[in-house]
Amino acid sequence: MGPWGKRDDMVVHRREPFNAEPPRHALAHRVLTDPESFYSRNHGPIPHIDARAWRLRVDGLVERPLTLSLGDLRGRFAERQLLATVQCAGNRRAGLLDVRDIPGEDPWGPGATSTAHWTGVLLADVLAAAGVRPGARHVAFAAPDVSPLADPPQPFGGSIPLAKAISGEVLLAWGMGGRPLHDVHGAPLRVIVPGWIGARSVKWLERVTAQAEPSANYFQAVAYRILPPDADPALAGPGAGIPLGPVGVNCAILAPDGRTPLPPGPTQVAGYAYAGEDRTVARLDVSLDEGRTWTQAELDAPLSPWTWQEWRIVVDLPGGDTVVTARAWDSNGVTQPESPATLWNPKGYANNSWDRVRLTTTGAQ
Ligand SMILES: Nc1nc2c(c(=O)[nH]1)N[C@H]1C(S)=C(S)[C@@H](COP(=O)(O)O)O[C@H]1N2
Ligand SMILES: [Mo]
């Protein structure tokens, strides 16, 4: 078993802070990701919080500021379940790094996304108990983990618009896969903002604040924003660029992963496809000729409105090398761009270009 209870073959980008993704095959052929395989993205040291002493503060533009223990949360609010995929904005960054270097950012593959069954209470219910006052437009989340990567170093935080916060979609979760959250995933309580970039699903949640403006936290105001290609992220101040929110349509080929040669002939190719917020994946195309011609894969319906979808197709592999390409279309008719070069941005976010895996065959050509 690897660090933080993760599988041995986890791809560890960094040990401090701990950042790791499962290999492609660990995500293949299953909707739910087991906790040992679930990716983990951290900007600072992972805290261990004494759940009994822990309290959640709810404050800002509210009628009744609240201080809630875990027992209060369980006792005062209805327990809810949510099946949701979490996806980091840095998922598939490696494709952008192939275009141009991104100093300081790790080369995440397609495993910076995972799916679990979450248990907790609705953020909407907690906000209703506090009574959100007119003038509140955003709900900010604060955590205790101080990130040395922020400028200046500060605890992780972020915010979502009030409309999403009170939609009844956002969970304050203490359970993952039917068990208490592990430290590495935010125990005792984390936010799950389904359909939005993972950065908004703040772990080790300590404070929920209703406010007029988005969070001024570094990870909302400076990072997790799309800067123009010629911008210097070290010089881009708070508010520069486009803040990331809902996740765009994306997909990945998970199996085969191209690591071992295959016999020529029929081979099943399988993967995930995902579209955030109010969209689902409507079609998945696979090409064996770099996108000149496409065949539609079999695509499963999502298990919940907030989960990725599995797809599979049997292709006939010719001898030699074949590049398999996949692209998804969402329920708005939007598809993925062909090339990561057109998407390159200085922090390396939101690479949703076509996924490609090179497969080699055994035997002579
Ligand atoms: N407190 C805190 N919350 C956090 C982070 C963090 O570093 N600190 N990372 C965020 C990011 S960028 C992502 S993608 C998800 C990852 O959640 P996971 O580690 O449970 O997979 O947590 C988010 N919540
Ligand atoms: Mo992330």
Image: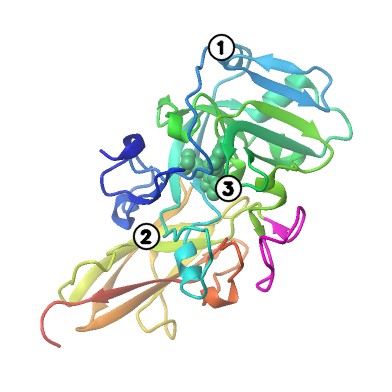
Residue located beneath label 1 in the image: 71
Residue 84 is at least partly visible in this image: no
Q: Is residue 306 above or below residue 233?
A: above
Residue ID at (49%, 27%): 187
Q: Is residue 254 above or below residue 290?
A: above
- Distance of label 3 from label 1 (alpha carbons): 34 Å
Asked if the beta carbon under badge 2 is closer than 8 A to the nearest atom of ligand 1, the reply is no
- Asked whether the residues under the numbered discs 3 and 2 touch, taking CB atoms below 8 Å apart as contact, a structural biologist would say no
From which residue to which does the magenta span run?
Answer: 226-243
Q: Measured from the top left, where is residue 25 in percent x and y?
A: 29, 55
Looking at marks 3 and 1 on the same chain, the residue that comes earlier in the sequence is marked by 1
Q: Secondary structure at mark 1?
A: helix
Q: Magenta segment: does it hold 229?
A: yes
> Residue 316 sits in which quadrant?
bottom left
- For badge 1, the amino acid type reads Gly
> Residue 279 sits in which quadrant?
bottom right
Q: Coloring scheme of the render?
A: rainbow
> In the drawing, does residue 214 fall left or right of residue 125?
right
Residue ID at (55%, 74%): 337
Residue located beneath label 3 in the image: 149
Residue ID at (57%, 61%): 350
User: Badge 2: few (under 14), some or many (20 or more) residues near its Cα, within 10 Å?
Assistant: many
- Asked whether the residues under the numbered discs 3 and 1 touch, taking CB atoms below 8 Å apart as contact, a structural biologist would say no
Asked if the beta carbon under badge 1 is closer than 8 A to the nearest atom of ligand 1, the reply is no
Residue 271, numbered label: 2
Q: How many marks?
A: 3
Looking at marks 1 and 2 on the same chain, the residue that comes earlier in the sequence is marked by 1
Q: Measured from the top left, where is residue 333 in percent x and y?
A: 60, 67
